[in-house]
Image (spheres, rainbow, N blue to C red):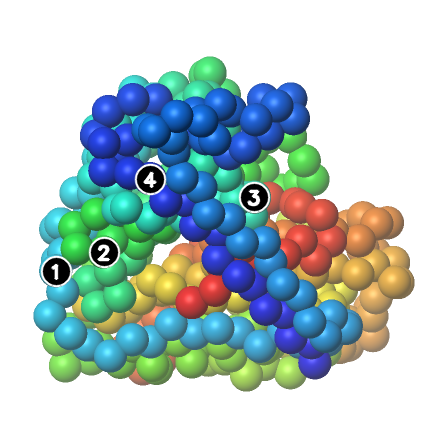
C-alpha cells in the first residue's frame, strides 16, 4: 500500500480583484517571466502556493478518500448549487470569469494541473451543452456538471466539480476528454447521459450517504488488480459508458455488462486506483467520483478468469484521470456507470484532498 499526501493549491485574490479586472496569472506564466502585477505596487495580487508533498510512493492500492460530511443546514441548497453551475458554464462560454461569485481563496485545476481561473479552457470554450447532467450535493456544498463543451467548434466531453462556500465558488475541478488520444471517444456532439441519473428514488428507498460511498469504494476495489473477484453489487442491466461509448467492443466484447466484465477480469491491467467521492445526491442515488486508474504496463498480455487472453491497450504506462457518474438503487446495486477519462502521465499526482 502506498500513501501520497497532497497539499492544497490556493490562490488568494483580493476583494477588488474578484469584482473587476482580468484574471490573475501565476508567477512565471508568460514564458517564464513574472507578472509584475503579482509582485509590484501597493495593489499587487497575492498568490500563495503550496506544492504536493509525496510520501511512501510504492506500487499498490492508494486508500480512497471518501467524503461523507455530517448533515448540516446548507447555505446553498440544490437549486442554488445548480444555478451556480449553470452560471459558471455560461461565464466560461463568454470567457468572463468576473460574472461569478468567487470566494477570497480559490483552488482550480484542469486535468490535474493546478492553475489560475481564467486560463486554459477559459480561452477556448465556445459553447456548452444545454442538456448536461447536474448533480447537486447541498450537504457538502459540491455540485457536478457533466456534458459537452465545444472548443473553437470541436466537441469534447467535460466534467466539473464546484465547491461552494457561503454562496461563493471556492474550488473548481475539471476533467476534459478531447478527441485526440487513445480510444474510446464517442460522438460528443450528440451524446446525452442516461435520464435515469436524474430520476429521484422513492423517499423510503434512498440509501444513506455512507452507503452510496461504500458502493463506489467496492466498485474500485473490484477494478483494482481485477482478478474476477467482485465486491460491489450490480443491477443485472448495469452497463458502463466511457467517453460516450458503451463498453461492449474490443476486450469488453468478451463479457457484456458491469458485473460480467469484472468477473471476467477485464481490468486486470489496472495496477492501482486513487479516488474521492466528493459529490453524493442521496435523493437520486447518484455519486460522482474523481480520481485515477493507474496502468503500470509491466506486462502487455493478460488472462481472464476463464483462461482467455487479451492484450493491453498500450505498451507504455499511463493513468486515466476520471470523473465518473454512478447511479445506485435503493438496495445498493449499481445501475449505471458513466465515465469521462482522459489519458495522462502515469501516476500523475492529484492536487486535491478532501
Instruction: Give the mark nearer the N terminus: 2 vs 1.
Output: 1
Q: Which residue is mark 1?
A: 75
Is disc 1 in contact with disc 3, using a CB cutoff of under 8 Å?
no
Question: Which quadrant of the view contains residue 328?
Answer: bottom left
Give SS at disc 4. Answer: loop
Residue 275 vs 181, above or below: the answer is below
Residue drawn at x 69%, y 40% as measured from the top left? 182
Q: Secondary structure at mark 2?
A: strand
Which label is found at residue 165?
2
Instruction: Give residue 177's quadrant in the image.
Output: top right
Which residue is depicted at the point 53% across and 61% down? 7
First in sequence, mark 1 or 3: give its number: 1
Residue at image point 15% right, 74% down: 72
Asked if residue 138 lies left or right of residue 172, the reply is: left
Earlier residue among tags 3 and 4: 4
Sequence-wise, the earlier of marks 2 and 4 is 4
**Where does label 4 land, which residue?**
13
The residue identified by callout 3 is 113
Image quarter where the C terminus lies is bottom left
Distance (Cα) linking label 4 and label 1 = 22 Å
Q: Are marks 2 and 1 in contact (CB under 8 Å)?
A: yes
Q: CA distance from mark 2 to mark 4?
A: 15 Å
Front label number (3 vs 4) = 4
Give the alpha-carbon distance from disc 2 to disc 1, as whole Å: 8 Å
Measuring from the top left, give residue 252's x and y in whole percent.
Answer: 66, 57
Spatial distance from mark 3 to mark 4, Cα to Cα? 19 Å
Question: Camera-side residue: 81 or 242?
Answer: 81
Tag 4 near tag 1, CB within 8 Å? no
Amino acid at each position: 500500500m502506498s500513501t501520497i499526501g497532497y497539499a492544497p493549491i490556493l490562490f488568494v485574490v483580493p476583494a477588488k480583484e474578484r469584482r473587476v479586472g482580468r484574471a490573475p496569472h501565476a508567477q512565471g506564466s508568460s514564458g517564464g517571466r513574472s507578472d509584475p502585477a503579482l509582485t509590484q505596487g501597493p495593489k499587487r495580487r497575492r498568490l500563495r502556493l503550496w506544492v504536493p508533498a509525496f510520501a511512501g510512493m510504492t506500487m499498490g492500492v492508494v486508500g480512497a478518500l471518501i467524503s461523507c460530511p455530517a448533515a448540516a443546514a446548507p447555505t446553498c441548497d440544490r437549486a442554488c448549487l445548480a444555478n451556480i453551475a449553470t452560471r459558471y458554464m455560461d461565464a466560461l462560454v463568454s470567457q468572463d470569469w468576473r460574472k461569478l461569485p468567487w470566494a477570497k481563496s480559490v483552488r482550480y485545476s484542469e486535468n490535474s494541473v493546478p492553475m489560475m481561473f481564467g486560463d486554459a479552457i477559459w480561452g477556448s470554450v465556445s459553447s456548452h451543452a444545454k442538456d448536461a447532467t447536474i448533480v447537486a450535493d447541498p450537504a457538502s456544498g459540491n455540485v457536478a456538471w457533466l456534458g459537452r463543451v465545444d472548443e473553437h467548434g470541436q466537441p469534447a466531453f467535460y466534467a466539473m466539480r464546484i465547491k461552494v462556500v457561503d454562496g461563493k465558488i471556492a474550488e473548481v475541478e475539471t476533467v476534459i476528454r478531447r478527441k485526440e488520444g487513445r480510444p474510446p471517444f464517442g460522438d460528443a456532439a450528440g451524446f446525452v447521459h442516461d435520464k435515469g441519473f436524474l430520476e429521484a428514488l422513492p423517499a423510503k428507498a434512498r440509501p444513506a450517504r455512507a452507503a452510496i460511498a461504500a458502493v463506489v469504494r467496492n466498485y474500485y476495489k473490484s477494478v483494482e488488480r481485477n482478478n474476477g473477484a467482485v465486491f460491489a453489487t450490480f443491477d443485472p442491466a448495469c452497463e458502463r459508458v466511457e467517453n460516450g461509448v458503451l463498453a461492449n467492443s474490443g476486450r469488453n466484447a468478451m463479457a457484456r455488462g458491469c458485473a460480467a466484465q469484472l468477473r471476467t477480469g477485464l481490468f486486470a491491467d489496472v495496477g492501482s486506483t486513487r479516488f474521492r467521492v466528493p459529490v453524493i445526491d442521496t435523493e437520486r442515488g447518484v455519486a460522482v467520483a474523481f480520481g485515477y486508474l493507474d496502468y503500470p504496463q509491466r506486462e502487455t498480455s493478460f488472462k481472464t478468469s476463464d483462461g482467455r487472453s487479451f492484450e493491453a491497450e498500450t505498451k507504455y504506462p499511463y493513468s486515466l484521470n476520471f470523473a465518473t457518474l454512478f447511479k445506485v438503487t435503493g438496495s445498493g446495486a449499481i445501475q449505471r456507470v458513466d465515465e469521462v477519462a482522459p489519458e495522462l502521465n502515469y501516476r500523475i499526482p492529484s492536487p486535491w484532498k478532501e
